[in-house]
Amino acid sequence: MIKAQHIHGIAELGRYLRDRRHEQDSTISDASSFTSIGERFISEIERGKKTAFFDKTLQYLNLLGLSLQIYPRNTLSIQSPYGAFTDIKAIGALARHHRKKQKATLETVKELSDLSLRFLSDFERGNNCQIGKALTALKTYGLEVAISPRNYRLSKADLLDV
């Protein structure tokens, strides 16, 4: 049984998605025919293309029966995960809330990530963006990403396997 896979970068995400599709004995063409996601996009995200759009990536996760889980990163203690997300607006709101809780400004995040203020502001408002930049932003905010089967509840024990 697959539990959760911690995602540290776009290449790792792509390999994980490809492996899950293969486990379902599905071709890229098969996966594309069940949704409005094109074969080219599926191929690109599975190869780790950083410029793939976040909204379509979330759709593809859903197609494969997977969820994107977000949890805070803290090296001194294990904190409860925030849960599964399927909506970019909710992810942006979580990022903004987490940043403000840490008393950080967008300027601080910009300096730490090399992402533009415009991108960060758009990201926090839940605008669609490139998956590579979104993963960088989440990591800079102190948030980690895991992919798990739909309805799987990420536990503190899962976080120990990072």
Image (cartoon, rainbow, N blue to C red):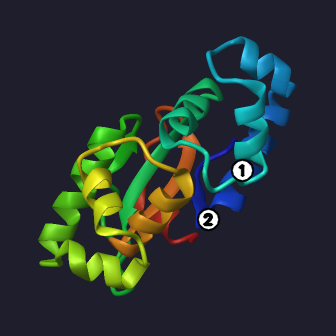
Q: Dividing the picture into quarters, in which one does residue 127 lie?
A: top left
Q: Kindly identify which residue carries mark 2.
A: 9
Q: Is mark 1 on a helix, strand or loop?
A: helix
Q: In this view, does 69 lie to the left or right of 108?
A: right
Question: Residue at coordinates 70% horizontally, 53% vertically from top-left?
Answer: 49
Q: Which mark is residue 14?
A: 1
Give the x, y percent position of residue 159: 48, 66
In this view, 87 is above or below 98: above
**Disc 1: CA contacts within 10 A as few (<14), some (14-19) or many (>=20):** many
Question: Residue at coordinates 75% horizontally, 38% vertically from top-left?
Answer: 20
Q: Is residue 84 left or right of residue 34?
A: left
Q: How many labels does the image show?
A: 2
Work out how far the residue at label 2 is from the one at label 1, CA to CA, in angstroms: 9 Å
Question: Residue at coordinates 49% horizontally, 61% vertically from top-left?
Answer: 133
Q: What element carries label 2?
A: loop
Give the x, y percent position of residue 56: 55, 33
Q: Nearer the viewer, residue 21 or 38?
A: 38
The amino acid type, in three-letter code, at marker 1 is: Gly
